[in-house]
Structures are given as C-alpha cells and as structure tokens.
Amino acid sequence: MKLKSSFEQAVCILLMLALSKDHMPLRSVVISNRLGVSDSYLKKVLHQMVVGGLISSEAGKGGGFSLSYDINRMTLLDVYNAIEGPSPIIKSTGIASRIFFDDQFVEVQEKKIFDQIGRAETQFKSGLKKENLGALLINPDGTHRQPIDWNRIGDDRHV
C-alpha cells in the first residue's frame, strides 16, 4: 500500500496549525514556504483538509487556515480519510472474468483476495485511529512543543 505524499504534508500542516502562536490562522503561502512546496499544489491539499473537516478557512485580512477542532482529538485516521478518502483501497475491475470464463470460480477467488485485503485494511485503519496527533507535539523528555509565530520566522530549522 502506498500513501500519497500529501498525507505526510497534511500531518505537518496540522502540527504547524496546532503550534501557531495564539492560534493565529496561517496563510497558504506561509505554510508552503515552510514546507518547501508550491503554493498552488498546497492549496489542493488544504482544500482536501477543509472538505475533510480537519481545518477551516477564513478569508480576508488576518485570515488563513486554522484547526477545525482540537489536535488532541485528531487521529492519523482522520488525516487518512481526508486525503485518501473513505473508499476501500481496492475494488474489482472484473478483469479476471476475461481469462476465466467461469463466473462462479471468479467470484469465489476474488472473494478470497478481497476479503484478505479488506482485513488488512481494517487492521491498518484501526492502527491509524490509535495514533493521536497531539502526541506528536510532545518532546522526548515529555515537555510540550512551544507555540511558534510562523509569520515571523524564516527558514530556521531549529524551531
């Protein structure tokens, strides 16, 4: 299974927003500069996150993107569903029926495959649901990351 690169970017965006000093909304250009991705591409990821209910968008001066709800209630599954979508990772295209002319045989064999993949997907999603994003903001010594004014820092790698 391969996740889109936008999954990792979405996690980083959420962590940035959670650390934003005084919960100030961040403009897409600030986020794209920090992540080193194009602003136009990032806007597509941000749109998926808005539609997925993870973040909200505010227009106008002082506007930008902010968390829709507390980072401590967000899980990796929430991010996965927003970026990858809720549909199953695989579905039959019917191609097997082109080589095996016995529809019952194809149905039984496809069921074996799709049931196994379905179990793996359920286990994968269960693991994602256990991982809370707020826990990613805790330093190895147990202290919490401090708020950051993303609008004022440059490309400092030590924040």
Image (cartoon, rainbow, N blue to C red):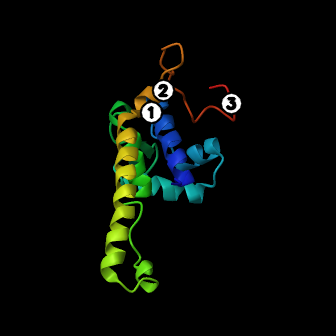
Q: Which residue is mark 2?
A: 137
| Res 51 seen here | no
Number of marks drawn? 3
> What is the CA distance from the residue labelled 3 to the residue labelled 2?
16 Å
Of labels 1 and 3, earlier in sequence is 1
**Amino acid type, residue under disc 2 in the picture:** Leu
- Which mark lies nearer to you, 2 or 1? 2
Classify mark 3: helix, strand or loop. loop
Above or below: residue 72 compared with residue 30? above
Above or below: residue 69 compared with residue 51? above
Residue 116: give x, y in percent of width and height.
37, 56
Q: Label 2: how many residues lie within 10 Å, few (<14), some (14-19) or many (20+)?
A: some
In the figure, is residue 129 to the left or right of 61? left
**Amino acid type, residue under disc 1 in the picture:** Ala
Q: Are marks 1 and 3 in contact (CB under 8 Å)?
A: no
**Residue at 41% over, 46% down:** 79
- Which mark lies nearer to you, 3 or 2? 2
Classify mark 2: helix, strand or loop. helix
Q: Which residue is mark 1?
A: 18
**Amino acid type, residue under disc 3 in the picture:** Arg
